Image (cartoon, rainbow, N blue to C red):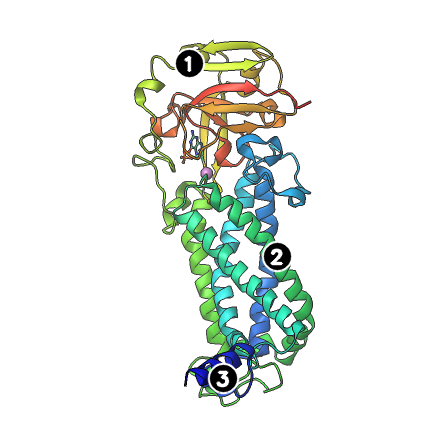
Amino acid sequence: MVRRIASRLAGLALGRGDPPPGPFRPTFWRSPIRGPWLSSVLGSILLLGIPVVFVTGLLSYAAYNPGLGGGNDRTPEKGILGFYLFTWPTHPVWLYGLVIGTHVLVGLALFPVVLAKLWSVIPKLFTWPTLRSPAHALERLSLVLLVGGAVFELVTGLLNIQLFSPWSFSFYTAHLYGAWVFMGAFVTHVALKLPTMVRSLHARRLRDELRTGLADTRPEELGDSGLVAVSPAAPTISRRGVLGIVGGSSLLLVGLAGGQTLGDGFRRTALLAPRGGTFPGDFPVNKTAAGTGIRRADTERAWRLAIEGNGRSVSLSRDDLLAMEQRTERLPIACVEGWTTTQTWTGVRLADLVALVGSPSAAGVLVSSLQQGGAFGAARLAANQVRDPRSLLALKVNGSDLSLDHGFPARVIVPAAPGVHCTKWVRSLRLLADRA
Ligand SMILES: Nc1nc2c(c(=O)[nH]1)N[C@H]1C(S)=C(S)[C@@H](COP(=O)(O)O)O[C@H]1N2
Ligand SMILES: [Mo]
């Protein structure tokens, strides 16, 4: 008995003999609309969308200026994956918002497409024998990375925009490396499947299919794709219906989240966006002062800004800062989670402050916060960001003093930079010396 079970299990593992009952039998899969045409239509949407998500993801990574090291570089072991990194520009001001908004929204829109694509090819998961040859085994391994990678990237991305703090950098590191693993598998898969995809797309016309209702829905030709049901059930939905549900779900997701990327009045439409401000009419706050252990007392009377560099050091009170030349700029904060908010900031130019002790080198300027510990590292700004005349140490927003949650007594605001570099509750600016 035991021996029979053991030999049966070994047979199953290697896929010998007849397929066991259930999903390994071709008769198990009965959907009359499953087939290479439908899979290829869904695949071609992914073929267009995934590169957009990948490229905007890589750009977002570059926007963090990891080349400056320190807290900016959460992936010091990246090696050649950093081959394309460049100094992030400060023009146009909405650049980071566009990059990350596109990344998040296209990623969300692809969610239903990926699920539908997985449904459409699921019989392939149960091919029999399970491993035919070493080549077949390799192909299946690439599919594990492809499917696992897609699900991992979508889920970590979704959790990040809904729950995680953006500076819990386990996400950041995992999402970056996961993307490269996934893309390796994706490129392999496309190279292997492109001819089949093109051929399958030619088998039916999209326009005709969109005119075909349930009553006229017929299975695709049986062929040897392994996708078309050998004993199809009667259709309960047309291909048009499936594509409609997938497209409608994508639009719904984008519609529920898109408002936060557009910001301002549109934000009210973003029902999926989790963050509002701390009072009515306020703009979003991710991290409140209370949540980060900032004590009001430390931000008031005794607070001073330290500026250090070239062996010199200057200490300024908030009144000293208010006595300097004040500039007003309308600039966005764009968070890696996909939300953007544009406000009118007033304060002192970063360049004017840094000029009190020197001028920024290629190593940039280290901005430290009153915030102690936690995962929020002090952010480094690149020389081009500090020199940009619109970069401010903001003291006010929309004409009033910053609220404590928005970084009182002073916060950094830099055009086109990712929000995470707009440090709140600033305590010091330090010119970094170039590494020898
Ligand atoms: N000291 C400090 N500054 C900070 C943060 C923080 O957690 N601590 N969050 C950053 C991030 S990720 C963003 S997007 C912007 C805006 O965040 P907020 O909504 O918490 O103000 O502030 C940045 N400045
Ligand atoms: Mo952020």
- Mark 3: which amino acid? Pro
- Mark 2: which amino acid? Met
Which residue is depicted at the point 49% across and 42% down?
Answer: 336
Mark 2 secondary-structure assignment: helix
Q: Which residue is mark 1?
A: 304
Which residue is depicted at the point 51% across and 74% down?
Answer: 122
N-term mark: 1 or 3: 3
- Mark 1: which amino acid? Arg
- Pointer 1 local density, CA inside 10 Å: few below 14, some 14–19, many at least 20: many
Label 1, label 3: how many angstroms apart (C-alpha)?
71 Å
Which residue is depicted at the point 59% across and 27% down?
Answer: 385
Which residue is depicted at the point 48% across and 31% down?
Answer: 377
Residue placed most toward the observer, 325 or 152: 152
Mark 1 secondary-structure assignment: loop
Q: Could you tell me residue 9's position as x and y percent?
A: 48, 79
Q: Could you tell me residue 110's position as x and y percent?
A: 51, 60
Question: Is residue 416 something one can see in this rendering?
Answer: no
Mark whose residue sits in front, 2 or 3:
2
Q: Quadrant of residue 417?
A: top right
Label 1, label 2: how many angstroms apart (C-alpha)?
48 Å
Give above or below for 82 relative to 12. Answer: above
Q: Could you tell me residue 138's position as x and y percent?
A: 64, 68
Residue placed most toward the observer, 269 or 134: 134
N-term mark: 1 or 2: 2
